[in-house]
Amino acid sequence: MFKRIISIASALLVSAAALNAQDAIVRIHDIGTGEIIPADIYGQFSEHLGRCIYGGLWVGKDSSVPNVEGYRKDVFDALKALKVPVMRWPGGCFADDYHWMDGIGPQEQRAYISNNNWGGTLEDNSFGTHEFLNLCEMLDIEPYISGNVGSGTVAEMADWVEYMTSDAKSSMADLRRANGREEPWKVKYFGIGNEAWGCGGSMTPEYYSDLFRQYQTYLRNFGSNRLYKIASGASDYDYNWTEVLMKNLTGKGMKGLSLHYYTVINWGRKGAATGFDEAGYYRILSKAIEIEPVLVKHIEIMDKYDPRGNVDLLLDEWGTWYDVEPGTNPGHLYQQNTMRDAIVAALNFDIFHKYTRRLKMANIAQVVNVLQAMILTNETQMVLTPTYHVFEMYNVHQDAEYLASDCITNKIKTDRELVPEVDVTASRKDGKIHISLVNTHYDQPKTVLVGFDNEKAISKIKSARVLTSAKPGDYNDFDNPGVVAPKAFKNYKKTTSGIEVTLPACSIVVIEAE
Ligand code: AHR
């Protein structure tokens, strides 16, 4: 602690003299925090919504689109490169309409339903439990199953857990075997409902607490499988929901408590994903970083009821939510993704890294073709979005030791939170230090002096990459898939005590040093 106060003080002294020459001064406390950034902060969310599953992850084995056992090959390969740690499925709102037995057995005999949450689209259940869990196994992803409380039953949920994870002799485990899967899968994360205050049943927190206690009683650990049970948590500013659940469910089987926070200014007039002006750019960034005080308040409540930190906070839905692209089904939530979204993702990660004492998972909404997606597809083509590139560039921080830092920078005034011009996060793993720097400025480059508590913390810079584009509104589409893509970055100088970096306007730079 003493060390940290000294270092902040020395950074401030430096600032007075040097902020004229630099736009920002960063001080990295390379002594370390001992806190590891959980890989699950980089989680994904996949829902039966629009073209997330069908046409996104799954085309079926007989499709003319190149596929690996029915999974789109281009998407499969892109996800492999991303090192996805965890993926949530089948919803979202869809989860509380989902009856898992509809999605097992021979494909041609599966039930077909109307997806009433999301545009009334035909759901033929060709992607079900086997298809999801096999995908996770093939890509080494931890599955996170979201169970149906809103329109399901305790028995249905208990049977699903048994079907997936039991190695015993029982009719559920035998049904799985008859459907072609001998060994049980490993399933750790299990969500008991989704948005129980809304599409998951319009419940009060008191009523949901009672249901959670009932449902969780029958979700059993089979063989060596150990379930980590997750309660359906609050939406952004609903602190009362967290209060009631923490009061009623701490020590009652709840290991994780979820939270949803979307970057939306006005639910009635969300605005377009592209074609925004400077004010629209900063408005979204300011709403994105408003997640920090929201996290702090939920964590304060959790600390009150659970000072030892036995219950984790899981931000299992987050990201930007705009108007759908013109001409697309309003229920399919298909939106483009620009450099603005890339900056949103980077600023969010910088915040998440600070709170991993309590925040153990985050799942962006969603992985393909929905909201702030990693990947967009049409019939045969695929593009990687600017957000994908941030996830890929930042994956060096997964399971690395968090290095706290201070950043002295100007702040841009908006009608909400002040947006820092420069933001930073740093971590250390296997003897390497990774420093991610963000220049949020709409059209100005920024020069940053990066220093360390220990002047000998780094001896050389191994590599650096930048994500930027001519304009913050730039994006990748099927005709121009490479407009926004990471490139090698050279605009830095190693100084005796640190690094001087000039960040292009609206950019993200990741530096690897040792
Ligand atoms: O991600 C889209 C929807 O947003 C989810 O289905 C729901 O949980 C949330 O309201």
Image (tube, rainbow, N blue to C red):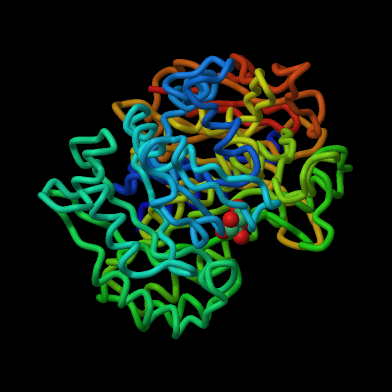
Front in this rendered view, residue 280 or 189: 189
Instruction: Give the residue at x 62% y 52%.
Output: 114
Q: Looking at the image, in which quadrant does ligand 1 appear?
A: bottom right
| Residue located 85% across and 39% down the image | 327
* Residue 209 in the image: above or below residue 495: below
Residue 464, percent across and down? 54, 19
Q: Hey, which residue is sitting farthest bottom in the picture?
A: 206
How many numbered callouts? 0
Residue 9 appears in view: no
- Residue 280 percent location from the top left of the image: 84, 48
Name which quarter of the figure residue 324 lies in. top right
Nearest the eye: 341 or 268: 268
Q: Is residue 118 left or right of residue 74?
A: right
The residue at the far front in this view is 109
Is the N terminus in the top left, top right, bottom left or bottom right quadrant? bottom left
| Left or right: residue 41 compared with residue 417 | left
Query: Dividing the picture into quarters, in which one does residue 479 lie?
Result: top right
Q: Quadrant of the C terminus?
A: top left
